[in-house]
Amino acid sequence: MNPCGANKHIGVLRGGPSPEYEVSLKTGGRILSLDIPGYKWKDIFIDKHGVWHLNGVAKKPSSILSGVDGVFNALHGTYGEDGGIQEVLDIFGIPYTGSGRVASALAMRKDLSLKCCADKGINIPISLLIREGDAGEDVITFCEKVSFPLVVKPVSSGSSIGVFLVSSEDELKAAVKESFKYGSAVLVQEYIEGREATCGVIEGFRGEEIYGLFPVEIVPHFSTFFDHEQKYGGKTIEFCPGNFSEEEKNMILKNAVLIHRCLGLRHYSRSDFVVNSERGVFMLEVNSLPGLTENSLFPLELESSGISFEEFVSEILRKIFL
């Protein structure tokens, strides 16, 4: 325990055994580059095999965590966003940024989070969950009901990793096989044509229970599909605020707040949508720990909303000690 007035030691967790390892390194690196009064960083690196390191030296989590007052969770995807690291931190009684164990696990499972939000009246794409070993009859029936193109994605992955847009049964089979490399379950969904949007929220900010940021409109350069290469390869144009009608903007904001609330998320989140001119706004997924890199969308929303990155990080850290 630090004496009154001393800097709080904050461990910045980054890396991890996830396909989003590189994104996490960049998110954590950006946090570590900040100089925020009242806090002193400790760089906690978790390698791809799940081994913890402090200052480049492998150590047990218990040894590392005994020297911190709190944790900024800069992990993404598996272990960092699915309730795994949250369970570890809860066991050691370490306060941390982001959502708790149960909410994180729920948000990470696209099938469960979509169903939960659909029960609250939010539009979602027609979807089919496929597990390894499932018979193919359900897929055939789904394809008869929902015409191509279809979207194939791992049920528990982020950063658009393992996501495919397919236009035939052969492409569908290949995409499902590839998506299974990222988990034991895959979602097949109807493709909803429209404009991609994303919207972040922050809890208890600017006098609001859940403060909605300006929605971003995402326009891929070379295709109509926002995949991992488009997302992190600098191959998109982002407009913030997006070029949405007032009605569309309000619905995106309303849904982002509702998703955060109904999934029991904490501190901040970012929800992804597609806006169809005839059918309205559809939820695609929610990110309980959105990327905070230089190319990430959440920081763009912060900037457009007149919020500095330092102010945001300070606010989130303040919350874990309330």
Image (spheres, rainbow, N blue to C red):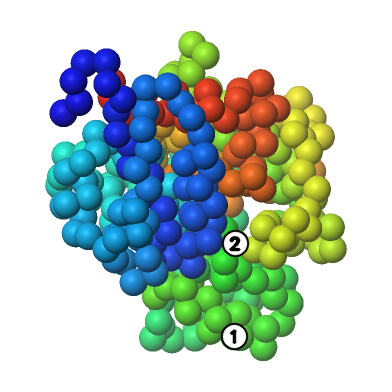
Observer-nearest of 202 and 194: 202
**Can you see residue 140?**
no
Q: Considering depth in this image, is 282 or 260 the residue closer to the camera?
A: 260
Question: Does label 2 or label 1 sit earlier along the sequence?
Answer: 2
- The residue that appears at 60% across and 25% down in the rendered structure is 308
Residue 11 rendering spot, x and y as whole percentages? 33, 42
Residue 279, placed above or below residue 258? below
What residue type is disc 2 on? Ser
The CA span between labels 2 and 1 is 19 Å
| Quadrant assignment for the N terminus | top left
In the image as oriented, which residue stretches furthest toward the top?
A: 207
The quadrant in which residue 227 appears is bottom right
Residue 96 is situated, as x and y percent measured from the top left of the image, at 31, 38
Give SS at disc 1: helix
On screen, residue 145 versus residue 95, left or right, reads: right
Residue 17 in view in this figure:
yes
The number of numbered discs placed on residues in the rendered structure image is: 2
Q: Toward the viewer: 145 or 229?
A: 229
Figure quadrant of residue 263: top left
Q: Which residue corresponds to mark 1?
A: 173
Q: Nearer the viewer, mark 2 or mark 1?
A: 2
- Quadrant in which the C terminus is drawn: top left
Image: 309 above or below 271 = above
Q: Position of residue 17 (x, y in %)?
A: 38, 66
Above-or-below relation of 48 to 205: below
Q: Is residue 295 left or right of residue 116?
A: right
| Position of residue 61 in the picture relative to residue 157 (left or right) | left
- Helix, strand or loop at label 2? It is loop
Rendered residue at 34%/71% (across/down): 49
For the point 64% across and 45% down, which residue is it?
Answer: 294
**Mark 2, residue position:** 160
